Image: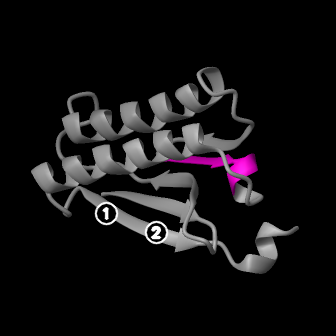
Amino acid sequence: MIKASFLETSDGVLYGYEFDGHAGYAEEGTDIVCAACSVLAINTANALEKLVNAKLTEEERDGYLKVEVLRLKEGESFPEATLLLEALKLGLSDIKQSYGSRYVQLKTWTLPEAAEND
């Protein structure tokens, strides 16, 4: 199962996401659910960097990706980046609705206020 967590500030603004795991819908190389989720996650990171010039922190390894938009995490307004993160959330919600929570799980984690001001 892919566990996708959306990271938000205490004000409810998305500032990043974290994906962990593999869908398990089919064998590696033919798993369309895993491929779809991966494409959305990687395309969102690329769009954030290349289209809206967002400064990101990224952590990646097999079956794991974490991306944070620094300006949003620090509480700044950045509507273009927010729109891309909301689009990612919408796309994953659609995949979950089509294939089920057996393969994709979505959560939202709120950043404590003190961490926003670090």
Of 27 and 44, the residue lying toward us: 44
Direction from residue 84 to residue 1 in the image, left or right: left
Disc 2 target residue: 108
Q: Amino acid at mark 1?
A: Gln
Residue occupying the far top of the picture: 50
Quadrant holding the N terminus: bottom left
Question: What is the distance, in whole Å, between disc 2 and disc 1 at their CAs?
Answer: 10 Å
Of 108 and 51, the residue lying toward us: 51
Residue occupying the far left of the picture: 98
- Residue at 43 percent across and 48 percent down: it is 86
Picture quarter containing residue 47? top right
Query: Is 72 placed above or below 113 here?
Result: above
Direction from residue 42 to residue 34 in the image, left or right: left
Task: Magenta stretch: give its range.
Answer: 64-72
Disc 1 target residue: 105
Quadrant holding the C terminus: bottom right
Q: Position of residue 83 (x, y in %)?
A: 48, 42
Q: Does 59 appear in magenta? A: no
- Residue at 52 percent across and 48 percent down: it is 64
